[in-house]
Amino acid sequence: MDRVSVFSSGLFFATMAVMVIGLVSIVIPFLPATLVIWLGIFLYGVGTNFAVVNSQLLLTVSVLAFGTVFLDYIMAIWGHRKYHGSLWGILGALVGGFIGAVFGNFAGFVLGPIFGAILFELLRGRDNIFSIKTERFTIVGYIGGTLVKFAVSIAMIGLFLWELAQHPTP
């Protein structure tokens, strides 16, 4: 298989479709975007008997994907503990993020988790000032985490495409 047919194969397009789903899922707080992209790379490796996706590439993208997910959860837990947030606030941010995602615009993605966490904290009985203080971390953490996931996702896709361009025959 030559370079042109590698980039035009059905397996390549299926892999890229999975990666696009991963990129889109970056803005949805409860979907593991980098793991979806990792899955696309892994499935391409399986489909080509790991001729292009060698152990070095798989190890690199695995560390990036799983490290990002691990840090995302650790930072969320740390931030909520620091600002004395509760599981209600986390649940509210998830619900608000899901509802914001349904509306499909940027404002929904950003404001949904904020308003969800504030509402759930208020329903739990926390005072308004405390909830808003907690939400400052939530918004900064959400935007920062989204930017990091986006950068790591682009790096993973770039590494995959680089390897594919270097090894035209799977």
Image: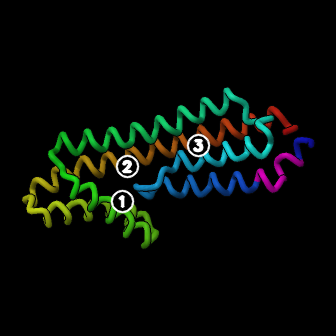
Report whether 14 appears left or right of 170: left
Report whether 101 appears left or right of 83: right
Question: Residue drawn 69% across and 53% down?
Answer: 16
Real-space Cα separation, disc 3 to disc 1, in angstroms: 21 Å
Which mark is first along the chain, 3 or 2?
2
Q: Amino acid at mark 3?
A: Ile
Q: Crowding at label 2, few (<14), some or many (≥20) Cα neighbours within 10 Å?
A: some
Q: Amino acid at mark 1?
A: Val
Whether the magenta-drawn stretch holds residue 53 is answered as: no
State the residue position of label 2. Answer: 143
Q: In which quarter of the view is residue 116 placed?
A: bottom left
Element type where label 3 sits in the image: helix
Percent position (x, y) of residue 6? 85, 46
Question: Residue drawn 32% across and 39% down?
Answer: 75
Could you tell me if the residues under marks 2 and 1 are in contact, i.e. CB atoms within 8 Å?
Answer: yes
**Which quarter of the rendered picture does the C terminus lie within?**
top right
Most distant residue in the top direction: 56
State the residue position of label 1. Answer: 110
Q: How is the image coloured?
A: rainbow
The correct choice, above or below, for 84 with respect to 100 in the image is above
Report whether 111 appears left or right of 158: left
Write the start and end of the magenta stretch as one range. 5-12
State the residue position of label 3. Answer: 154
Percent position (x, y) of residue 9? 84, 53
Real-space Cα separation, disc 2 to disc 3, in angstroms: 16 Å
Q: Crowding at label 1, few (<14), some or many (≥20) Cα neighbours within 10 Å?
A: some
Which mark is first along the chain, 1 or 3?
1
The correct choice, above or below, for 52 with respect to 92 in the image is above
Magenta stretch: dominant secondary structure: helix
Percent position (x, y) of residue 144? 38, 44
Question: Residue drawn 18% across and 40% down?
Answer: 82
Which mark is first along the chain, 1 or 2?
1
